[in-house]
Image (cartoon, rainbow, N blue to C red):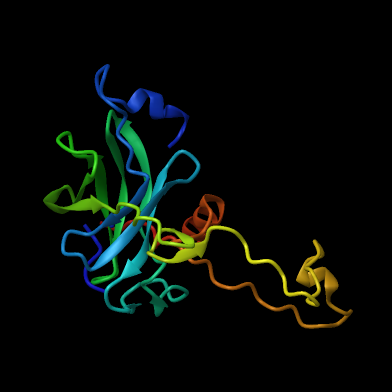
Amino acid sequence: MRRTCLAFSGLVAGLCFSAGIACADPVGQWTTEKGYAKIRIENCGNALWGAVAWEQTTGIDNKNPDPSKKGRPTLGMPVLLDMKPVQPNKWAGHIYNSEDGQTYSSNISVSPNSPDVLQVRGCVLGFLCGGEDWIRVKDDPAQPGGASVPGGAVVPSHPAAPAANQPRPNSTSTMSAQKPGAVAVPPRPVDIATASVEDFCATVTLNGAPAPIH
């Protein structure tokens, strides 16, 4: 994957601009400056986390110093890590760069000129600072027979009815329905673009990059 480095809580009420101006809100999907990737940002336990929800070219995290994470796909990879509010419209934490396998100090803020521009900044040892401006991904217009979801997929407006002689699913889980001694089927990987906030947070906080070293 091309460089995705640069990447609410109950406190959100205190993170607004002056009266009469809407609160800054980084939650959502953002396209990186050169359009190589889309990053989904969510609030996970009073901190913002961002992960790759879409990429132009399939990539592998080959330079990660953590052996358990080295070689993982960059799609779904956390890049904005544990960003916490430090002042109105500013969250600070770390950002992971798969190009060099390093984690850097970083901060994000919504542009004061547009709620659809996210300013992503990062620094090495407090200097050599740089960054990008990401653009908010707008929902695609609903298509006939379905509604758009993050990532551009279309889902039916109403669930399809089961076929005439098709058995209806029950509430019994696959695990509990298995015979004694049967091998459990591993769960499918979480789709970062369409996962619930709960599943998104569970995935990214578990699979975050190594501890910051810069």
Give the residue furthest to the top: 19
Q: Quadrant of the C terminus?
A: bottom left
Q: Could you say which is closer to the camera, residue 5 or residue 167? A: 167
Look at the picture and state if 126 lies above or below 157: above
**Coordinates of residue 10 in the picture (x, y in percent):** 47, 29
Residue 124 visible here: no
* Image quarter (top left, top right, bottom left or bottom right) of the N terminus: bottom left
Q: Position of residue 111 (x, y in %)?
A: 18, 39
Near-viewer residue (173 or 12): 173
Write the residue at 78% across / 66% down. Answer: 173
Where residue 27 sits, quadrant-wise, is top left
Q: Is residue 193 above or below residue 108?
A: below
Please indicate whether residue 131 sits to the left or right of residue 172 in the image. Answer: left
Looking at the image, which residue is at 37% across and 39% down? 84
* 202 vs 178, nearest the viewer: 178
Q: Nearer the viewer, residue 60 or 159?
A: 159
Residue drawn at (25%, 44%) of the image: 107
